[in-house]
Image (spheres, rainbow, N blue to C red):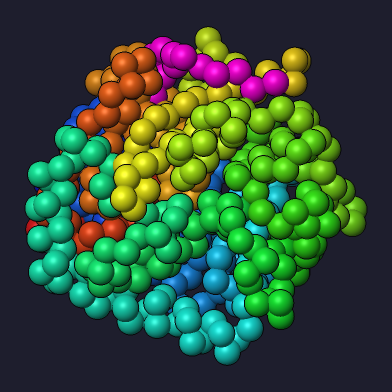
Amino acid sequence: MKNDGPPLSSQPYPWLVICPLRKKPQTFFSISEDRSYKRSIHEFCNAIIRASAQEWLVLEDFDSTDCYLWNPISNDKIQLPPLPNNDKLLCLLFAPPNDPQCRVLFLIHETTPDDDDDENTDDNTDNKNSNDDTDPNDDDTDTNDDDIDNEDSDDGANDDNPDDDTDPDDNNTDSDDDDIDNDNLDDDAVANNDNPDDEDENTPPPALYLCKPGYDQEFHKQDLKTIIGVDLFLGWTVFKGDFYVLTWQTPHILLRLDVDDSSGTISATPMTNQPPYDHFTELLDMPYSRSYLFQSSSHDDEKEVELLYVHILLYGRTHVDVYKITVFRFDFVKAVWEEMKSIGETAIFLDNSYGGTTCCTRGTHIKKESIYFTEGRYLYSFNLETQSISVSLPWPEILVKNPRSYWLTLMATLDESLTHNFE
């Protein structure tokens, strides 16, 4: 672990930021350098990163439903209107605040204050600080993981189907750092709930909350189902100045969300009725999967940005082992998804909110044809061309079994006045 060194600077690929516990230093890992830097950024100690656009981040405070935009380069902050109590939250940031088209869009599963106090308050505060980094089961579990990683190559992944993971150690050692991060990012499960009818009939339906930061005093609220016809989806993203949603239902598989700025209302325009893959053949024996929808990065001037979809098939006793990863690009001219057998000199980075980013590997030590993602304390790399997977533990000093992690692209050198080095 590198505890000091040069400022955290801009680079053509994202930093992997590991946040083990509240009020603890963060680890910034450079994939190309294979090197870590330990810093303590106050905002990261007290909030969750929900979305980003260039150097601006959308942060959610741990101890409340407050959300705000924050710029780690300038330390500027823009408070957002208050949000309701919720147990699941997803967010997209359309553009940075200096862009006239800047908008922030939330998908929220609202709860009543009583439910939120009972179910979430402890998760969001006390339990997150409790025994994640001291529970001896963590060491035992992680040691066992080391023994099987090269065989199963995906131990610890439990985001899509947490209810299917019956390992009692997982329930005890994941604690609720995972509940704040990964529970909200069951957000694939927000959008991928197989049994939406099982929810309490008194629970408000999932809704979209839209606002223009710095201008709107309150959010424009609209039930998701009134826009896309259902209250679940596979994924969503910002692509070339528009919001897009990928749903299960036909005939509207891929939808563009159109925003009326004057009224704040959202409507949907279908883009295709063709799914990226055939559910009835590919998924017949692999009923568990993960979906990632995102825009490729524009760092490579030779390539046009593309709308990408990554699909991961899972298997195993707890449905967490990676069987296959497939990448698709959307052809807007033909209105079809096309499978990409190769991504060439490109690396894909999948985040825990079921989005992602890319970078050009040319001139770096990052492997081409690679798809990077984290599971618990481990970093995985999947080679699309060879369909092989490898695993590493670049930060062995982090004992928390499921730390929060983010892929963060810095557009400029991070102001050292915002950070503190740790011995």
Q: Nearer the viewer, residue 409 or 420?
A: 409
Number of residue marks: 0
Residue visible at 29% across and 58% down in the picture: 403
Residue visible at 33% across and 53% down in the picture: 318
Q: Nearer the viewer, residue 52 or 385?
A: 385
User: Is 241 included in the stretch rendered in magenta?
Assistant: no
Is 272 positioned to the left or the right of 145 in the image?
right
Is 144 positioned to the left or the right of 33 in the image?
left
Q: Nearer the viewer, residue 331 or 91?
A: 331
Residue visible at 36% across and 15% down in the picture: 385
Q: Quadrant of the C terminus?
A: bottom left
Q: Would you identify the image quadrant in which residue 399 lies?
A: bottom left
- Residue at the extreme bottom: 114
Whether residue 314 can be seen here: yes
Could you say where residue 273 lies in the image, as x and y percent from the top left? 76, 30
| Magenta residues, start to end | 336-347
Image height of 143 relative to 344, above or below: below
Image height of 340 relative to 297, above or below: above
Could you say where residue 305 lies in the image, as x and y percent from the top left? 59, 22
Q: Nearer the viewer, residue 93 or 172?
A: 172
Is 355 positioned to the left or the right of 155 in the image?
right
Residue visible at 24% across and 78% down in the picture: 130
Is 37 positioned to the left or the right of 336 in the image?
left
Q: Would you identify the image quadrant in which residue 96 lies?
A: top right
- Residue at the extreme top: 302
Image height of 121 relative to 98, above or below: below
Could you say where residue 152 lies in the image, as x and y percent from the top left? 23, 39
Could you say where residue 422 lies in the image, as x and y percent from the top left? 15, 58
Whether residue 73 can be seen here: no
